[in-house]
Amino acid sequence: MDDVVINAPVLTKPGDAWEPKSQPKRRPRRLRSPGYVWLIPALALSVGLIYYSVGYTGYMSTLEWDGVSPVSRPVGAQNYVDAFQDPIFWKAIRNTVVFFVFSFAVQTALGILFAAIMHSKVKLAVLYKVVIFLPVVLAPSIMAPVFRQIFSANGQVNQFLEAIGLGFFAHPWLADQATALPILMVITIWHNTGLTFILYFAAMGQIEPEVMEAARIDGAGNFRALWSIVLPGVQGTTVAIFILSIIGALKTFDIPYLVTLGGPNYATEFLGTLIYRESIPLANAGYGAAISIILLVLALGLSMIVNIRSQRKEQ
Amino acid sequence: MQSARFRGAQRSIAAVAITGMAVAALAGCTGSGGAGGGGGGEGGSATSGTVDWWGWTPEQAVAEEYITAFNEEYPDIKVNFRQLTIDGYEAALRPALASNTGPDLFDIAPGAQFVQFGPNGTDLTEQVTEALGDDWEDQLAPIGVAGLTDEDGALRGIPVGSTFAGPVWINQQIFDEQGLTPPTTVDEWVSVCDKLEAADIGCFVQGASQVAFDQDTIQAIADTINPGLFTKATRGEAEWTDPDLVEAFTTWQRLFDEGIMQEGALGVQQYPDANNAFMAQDYAMVMMGTWYMQFTRPNNMTLAIEAAGVGGAEPFNMTPIPFPAATAEGTPGAMFGDANYGLVVNAKADARNAATTFAVWLGTSEKGQQIVANALNDIPSLTSVQPDWDSIELVNPEVQRPKLEELYERAATVTDNRLLPNSDLADAIGNAATTLAAGDVTPEEATETLQSAAEAAGVTFK
């Protein structure tokens, strides 16, 4: 029985999170082997399904291949060279950056605003929470035809503008290269703000009431309390949303594909839609795989940079 | 204690072994991609078994009609039809064929899809010869056979029926109510649209964001100026900068500039948006091919109107008209097309022989082809079979039947293809269409860019 003793970690002071006060000198041997065994299913799943797929995609990216033929031709890094020389690839990158900056900024601002309002004891708060969160659970495939109708030349947006005397603004919003991308950002913000709101709402609940109370006693107004107490208090959530938004922007596919098919004239092309178009309708599976690997590298690289900077800031 | 440790080690080794086998199996599943992997042995019985059939067409109810009739002759072959969306079809089929989990039988369209997926099918020449005799090629529509035969002369898909683009469908009721005559030239078309607009009725609707349909319209325009020139350009027998093709692209741009095309067409998809708008009678005209004949049947039209979100659906009288000529001297009404789909027997399938039995029956038997003809979705491959007009219910038989019979006659003379084998070229034509529609380029610039893109896509110009 002596070899099954487990020592729970004991916290000493706040800075020593999860540092065990005392450890046995040598872990019992019988605990080790079965412990590793329990890791194997997860390891097999991640190696078999994720890392193998990533590796295979990397291999595909060195081929000129249609994705189904038994014949393929190794081309080395040529697909990557083609991607960097492809103006549509750069247009997709530009769209992704613009899309990320605006959608992240607006979603974050709205999320914080709604969360702060909901923490201020408004009436019917539960109803508002449901209304704000509802778009998150609506599938883009269901909403896409609705948005195509709403923003069409004869759609409800233009009808509304005409009804309030702003008919000169009426516009085929999704058919115009200048407005198609902003409309997709509006749709995405509408779709994602509920999630941002919930995350901030939960994070704000973790701020000690005493700290807020002290700030109030010191004469801090709403804006000052939000700026100096709430925002620093939810910084971890902001970093997490920032990383998720970067990855989300890089992976954007469903809304542009379903609403605009990446058009008009590539005005709403993203890496996701470009990968699909190249890999499936155009049957350039090798080229599509190369863009997928570039997307993966960008997502990992940017996430690591944000994480490292965030950790340094905390230190 | 020793024994417990031994059992623990045994369990660990077993778990590692199982996991290793699982990973190897996963790797094996994916890694065997390509047509060369796997195989279906001898292909099973030709008169019994289960056949899994994938396709984007026909509709599920029509497929059931085919299968029921087939089972009267072959009761021991169970056919399971899985209808996939046309947009997601290639995305589903590509990995399925690359692995060993693909269907026994699948639809294939001529053109780029045949080039990509045709090599995954068996050669069906021998089976079709057995069914129809040595003169089988004379009995099937040539345009259907040509598009499903590979460069070695192997028939990789059995054409079930053909579809043709080129006509414009009009809401005859709206035209009659407004006292309008269908346009025969683009100038007349502009005039018709002005009158419909004055009556607060949409004129013509097209989902220009789905560029395959833009290609149909441009080809139809070009064929009214110089019949067959568009097809020659796709084959490298004429240059895209030919003055007649420049004029065709100029006319395409004119559709947008002069109010024929609805405002915001570039943000609209042909399916479902334009189709729904026509079915909801918001617009009086739409460019669709012979596949739209199915909606002259009241039941089909009622369902389509309901699917467009209209309550209390009442079928209306719609008829095909030839595409209006770009110029007064032009020839209206050219048509172009291919087999709508062919049935391909997956070379790796276990039930190859049963799948072949079904494909041959549907594509070559009079009974199977009569059902195809009467559905009015496809024009049957077997040229001896015509729709049994007397038994087909139409919304307005007096007006529609002569028009449909005329469409059938015109379709029989078509020699130009609709679907291109080169997907990069189709993409380039789509780019030319949308940049012109947006007013970003002139027709001369668009055709010069298209010429360069066609050369880059591997088209050799003579």
Image (cartoon, coloured by chain):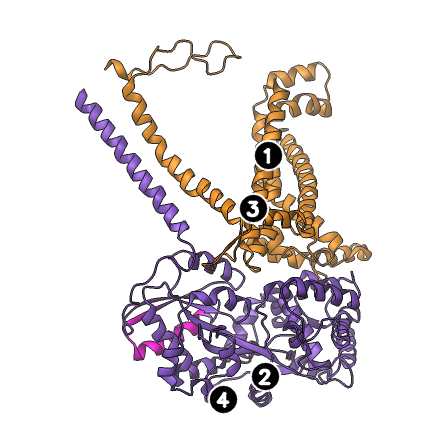
Chain colours: A orange, B purple
Left or right: residue B342 versus residue B279 is left
Same chain? Circles 3 and 1: yes
CA distance separating discs 2 and 1: 56 Å
Where's residue B335, x and y in %?
A: 62, 81
Q: Which residues are magenta?
A: B60-79
Q: Are marks 2 and 1 in contact (CB under 8 Å)?
A: no
Q: Which residue is mark 3?
A: A292
Left or right: residue A275 versus residue B256 is left
Name the amino acid, label 2: Val
Name the amino acid, label 3: Ser
Which mark, by number, is residue A97?
Answer: none
Q: Which residue is mark 2?
A: B414
Helix, strand or loop under label 2: loop
Name the amino acid, label 1: Gly
| Position of B118 relative to B195 (above/below) | above
Who is closer to the viewer here, A82 or A188? A82
Who is closer to the viewer here, B78 or A231? B78
On whether residue A194 falls in the magenta region, the answer is: no
Q: Which residue is mark 1?
A: A301
Q: Which label's residue is closer to the chain start, 3 or 1?
A: 3
CA distance separating discs 4 and 3: 53 Å
Q: Which label's residue is closer to the chain start, 2 or 4?
A: 4
